Image (cartoon, rainbow, N blue to C red):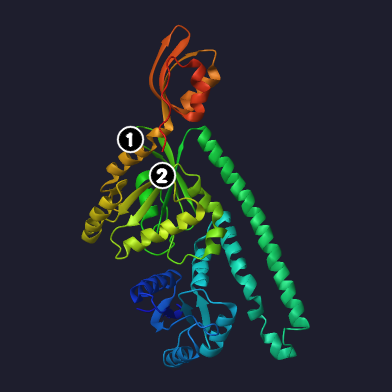
Amino acid sequence: MQNNDAETVLLVGVVLRNEEEWKVKDTMDELAQLAESAGAVVVGRFICRQPQIKAGHYVGTGKAQEIADWIKENPVKMVVFDDDLTPAQGRNLEHVLETRVLDRTQLILDIFAQRAHTKEGSLQVELAQHQYLLPRLRNMWTHLERQKGGIGLRGPGETQLEMDRRRIEDLIKTIKRDLKLVRTRRTEQRRGRRRHGWALVSIVGYTNAGKSTLLNRLSGADIYVENQLFATLDPTTRQVELPNHEPMLMTDTVGFIQKLPHHLVDSFKATLEEVVEADLLVHVIDASHPQVDIQIEAVHKVLDEIGGLEKPMLYVFNKIDSEKGRNSAKRLCRQFPKSVAVSALTGEGIDELFDELADCLKGRKIEMKLSVPASEGKLLATLQKNASILEQEYEGSNAKLLVRVSAQVAAQCRPFSTEDEPEPEQW
């Protein structure tokens, strides 16, 4: 039953010359999911076929009038376009359609604003919103043309426009400064984690692929999970213990989608740095999705933009609890050798995933035999806290130890090594 309080929306997409229609239909399906995630009800779709994007109305005046006629018969509160609109296109379309017009970026920003709960997430959303708004200010002040008749919003209109522009530019500078402090704090946190020798693992993937469900399964966390796009926006880090008793820190990052706007990626660099600095990326993929290959490609594209595509990656093909997902995962595991098939929902395949994680991270630690005098209390405390102690016995005042340590701790231990330890494996 339709919620009478929900905003009704019409979706509009464009198939250009030499473009495959099924790809546009796929992104339109995703746009519908985005609208539903924002709390709207989709009541119709228009897919327009044209040689190129029209500068004035995006879809051309004839098609815009056709959409306007449909809206008169089927009133909606909003029309959402599947691509970014220029300020002029948005203004012209609202004039013809006589209703609110949004583009894909505005819809995503609305969802982000709903889902950001931490100060960092709110700052990143606010930055993206202001960067989107800045070039569109003139459109917001067109009502002053009717009052003063100025071609370029002379007089009060011009004054207010410049004041608003300067105010938003100042806000952008302030937010960027605050986010720089966030990035500095995150860098210090990562350094602290590395001093402890913890492996840093980032979970990446298409939105709604099951990343949060997987982290809940692995760590026992209780991250919010819902079957909708961008159900979680703020990054969550949890400690997970591997079968070899080695600890690692896993971070669930923001999901990716097709046509993710570049300035959104830029705004979320503070979060996405977790990806770039990770020792290992766990790429979670919805194996049951009909466009799974396109989703993998979309994630690779964003990772390439932020410099994360060259990181070591473990592919996790999720949702094998469905027959379609299981059959697809078999094919994909042959295509991506460093991979495992799981169901984060039921737990199937999780033991194999733990083994793969341990195998991927084993090269980070060095096994050493040590003879440490009791007088080296600081080093012994460091080993108790940050090393895996495999064997321990005492010979006089010396502690005889067999340990597995990070490269940083190994450097402190070398004066007390009783044999030449192997170099850590390279990726």
Residue at horizontal 53 percent and vertical 82 percent from the top: 100
Which percent across, then down, holds residue 222? Answer: 41, 50
Q: Residues within 10 Å of mark 1 (few under 14, many from 20)?
A: few
Camera-side mark, 1 or 2: 2
What residue is disc 2 on?
Answer: 312
Tell me residue 373's x, y (percent). Answer: 50, 12
Image quadrant containing the N terminus: bottom left
Q: Residue at x 39, y 64 (%)?
A: 228
Residue nearest the viewer, comparing 206 with 231 = 206
Left or right of 304, for residue 163: right
* Quarter the C terminus occupies: top left
The answer to whether any part of residue 380 appears in the image is: no
Taking the spot 46% from the left edge, 70% from the top edge, the residue there is: 38
The percent position of residue 321, horizontal first and vertical second, equals 24, 56
What residue would you read off at disc 1? 243
Q: Is residue 44 above or below residue 118?
A: below
Q: Which mark is residue 320?
A: none
Q: Is residue 155 left or right of residue 55?
A: right
- Secondary structure, mark 2, is loop
